[in-house]
């Protein structure tokens, strides 16, 4: 038997399972039980999304029932914690603004042609489908930055579409620096 | 089942008189529970596999404290990636790959490999274990002294039996590089072991 054969034989006999000299579980447990801190980037981006949504909703509420010229409404800063993924939901402030815009959407749609209504609804369906799919993916991979960015973009596009349809783009602060 | 959580993984099946099939069924159940964020089930998986993961980390790093850190990192990574585990390979193989990534990631971050090799060469081996005795201990210590690339390939290919293709994929190197590192490892080990009377 030459050296290489002897070496191979000896290597296969080396112990493959070795017990650590101390219990390593407490350190692992501490790491996995500590809630993962969301990145400042995500918190900031979430706040901006909420700001856009809330200010749009406020503008809509201020304009509701007005028949005269549009009155500029100073957007109010509403920061609200929100995180995304299957086990998180957007905050109630964002949801209220979104619901208000959705309500207005129905009225605005009624004044549009059937073709335009169909186009707008199709666009919204695409965005909603994307939101559902991204949320499902985030359930499996909650720290995936690309998915988080895509989700934020989807919410932003939904809000932009709602604002365009409602004619609320004037005098509303917008942010594109997410 | 709760008893499992307080018994060392390598002893668990023997003490409980479980068959290999039973252990596999248990493992699958623990994986499913852990995938639903059950930390107790994940602890059970840790107990079952820690010796395999730590053994690999120790062979690859040649250092107890680094092996401990890599083992912890590997299990934390495994917890974070567990939802992606689909059972296409054995759970132990999946863990092995994560452990190799943990070792490589740690080395990339620290950039202290040369210092570590020198420290190991200058001092008594830090990884001597009861698992290796006599001639095997000489070999284990010689493997510890190998340069990083040669050691990683030798451990994965010669000790753990991965093919050069598999080792190359795990180490993110070309298959030819894996073979070259293995050749280098053999040459360096021959130089070290023949001095110590390693029988041929």
Image (tube, grey):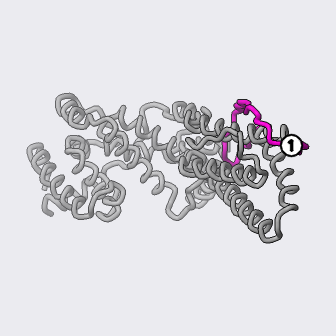
Q: Is residue A83 magenta?
A: yes
Q: Residue at x 37, y 38 (%)?
A: B67
Q: Which element is circle 1 on? A: loop
Give A38 or B138, whichever is nearer the viewer: A38
| B192 on left or right of B27 | left
What residue is shown with label 1? A68
Q: Are there few (<14), some (14-19), or many (20+) residues within 10 Å of tag 1?
A: few
Q: Quadrant of residue A61?
A: top right
Which quarter of the figure is the N terminus of chain B placed in? Answer: top right
Tell me where residue A160 appears, x and y as whole percent.
69, 50
Question: Relative to the observer, which residue lies in front, B11 or A122?
Answer: A122
Residue A92 in magenta?
A: no
B97 shown above or below A73: below
Residue B45 spot, x, y in % from top left? 56, 47
Q: Can residue A162 be seen by looking at this rendering?
A: yes
Range of residues picked out in magenta: A64-91
> Where residue A143 sits in the image (x, y, percent)?
56, 45
Q: Quadrant of residue A5?
A: bottom left
| Horizontal arrangement in the rendering, residue B193 relative to residue A127 (left or right) | left
């Amino acid at each position: 038997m030459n050296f290489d054969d002897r070496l191979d034989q000896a290597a296969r006999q080396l112990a493959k399972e070795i017990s650590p000299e101390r219990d390593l579980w407490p350190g692992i447990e501490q790491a996995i039980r500590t809630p993962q801190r969301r990145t400042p980037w995500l918190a900031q981006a979430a706040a901006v999304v909420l700001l856009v949504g809330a200010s749009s909703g406020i503008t809509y509420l201020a304009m509701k029932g007005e028949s005269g010229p549009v009155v500029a409404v100073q957007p109010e800063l509403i920061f609200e914690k929100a995180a995304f993924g299957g086990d998180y939901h957007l905050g109630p402030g964002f949801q209220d603004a979104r619901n208000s815009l959705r309500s207005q959407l129905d009225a605005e749609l009624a004044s549009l042609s059937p073709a335009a209504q169909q186009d707008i609804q199709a666009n919204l369906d695409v965005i909603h489908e994307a939101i559902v799919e991204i949320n499902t993916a985030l359930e499996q991979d909650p720290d995936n930055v690309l998915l988080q960015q895509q989700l934020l973009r989807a919410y932003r596009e939904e809000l932009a579409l709602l604002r365009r349809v409602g004619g609320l783009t004037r005098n509303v602060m917008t942010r594109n620096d997410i | 089942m709760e008893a499992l959580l307080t018994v060392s993984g390598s002893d668990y099946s023997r003490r409980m008189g479980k068959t290999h099939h039973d252990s596999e069924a248990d493992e699958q159940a623990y994986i499913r529970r852990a995938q639903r964020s059950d930390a107790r089930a994940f602890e059970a998986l840790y107990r079952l596999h820690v010796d395999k993961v730590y053994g690999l980390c120790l062979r690859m790093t040649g250092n107890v404290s680094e092996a401990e850190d890599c083992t912890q990192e590997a299990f934390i990574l495994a917890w974070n990636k567990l939802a992606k585990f689909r059972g296409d390979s054995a759970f132990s193989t999946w863990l092995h790959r994560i452990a190799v990534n943990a070792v490589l990631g740690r080395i990339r971050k620290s950039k202290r490999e040369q210092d570590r090799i020198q420290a190991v060469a200058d001092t008594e081996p830090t990884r001597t274990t009861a698992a290796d005795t006599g001639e095997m201990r000489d070999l284990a210590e010689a493997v510890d002294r190998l340069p990083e690339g040669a050691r990683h390939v030798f451990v994965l290919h010669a000790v753990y039996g991965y093919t050069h293709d598999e080792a190359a994929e795990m180490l993110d190197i070309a298959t030819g590089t894996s073979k070259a590192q293995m050749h280098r490892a053999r040459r360096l080990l021959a130089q070290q072991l023949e001095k110590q009377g390693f029988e041929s």
